[in-house]
Image: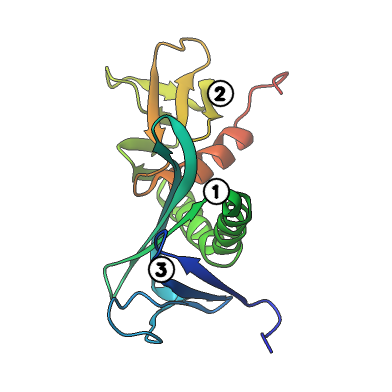
Amino acid sequence: MEAAGNLTYQLPTGLLGRKRALRLSPAYLEYENKDKDTGRYTRVSKEDILDIKHSMSWIIWYRFYVGCDFRIDIRTRESGILKIRFVSYFRQNGAYQKAYERITDYMWEHYFSDIEEAYMQEFAAKQDLRLCGVWLTDEGAYFAHDGQLTEWPDVAVKEYEEYFALYNRQDPGQNKRIEFDEWESHILFSVISLLTQENKPTGTE
């Protein structure tokens, strides 16, 4: 019987490929990523996780959307990068899209929130943070191509399906687009979303 709070998924690696198990618990995750050895897992503890990025793309055959390709990469202190890959086709697409969302939500809740908190604490202590080519200071953020500072009341962020954009409220031409399939992108999005909320000008939504 699965312990409370744990999740296990059997994830298909191809149309005819075998399924590989992914086990998630609040303290660690395990993935059956050994190519030749069924039943052998790579385990990563929560404390070993440095960053997570993930993406989903459609598989297209002759202009028809037939499947989904799911990618989750986990950067660790000890083992480098653990790559979790799975695909779905036809009628299975909806079920595995839901599984992908549940997996990434679980990782956010149990692994990523602590990473976010650590970066927020670092920024609070130093008032200086650099992520994804963006420099955050106590005055604001440097993300424009001309290198100018955008002060916090003017920093805005907008989320899209595959990326997010940073821009200056007063001058939207000063902007930077960051793909979610980049290292540190989810960390930056979380941190800067919190900071813009804290520094939101009066009268804005």
Front-most of residues 47 and 122:
47
Which SS class for mark 2? Answer: helix
Other residues around mark 3 within 10 Å, as few (<14) / some (14–19) / many (≥20) = many
Which SS class for mark 1? Answer: helix
- Tell me which label, 3 or 2, sits earlier in the chain: 3
Q: In which quarter of the image is residue 60?
A: top left
Q: Quadrant of residue 204?
A: top right
Q: Residue type at mark 1?
A: Phe
Q: Residue type at mark 3?
A: Ile
- Pointer 1: what residue? 90
The residue sitting at 44% across, 75% down in the picture is: 47
The residue sitting at 46% across, 10% down in the picture is: 171
The residue sitting at 68% across, 76% down in the picture is: 5
- Tell me which label, 3 or 1, sits earlier in the chain: 3
CB contact under 8 Å: marks 1 and 2: no
The Cα atoms of the two marked residues, 3 and 2, are separated by 33 Å
Q: Residue type at mark 2?
A: Pro
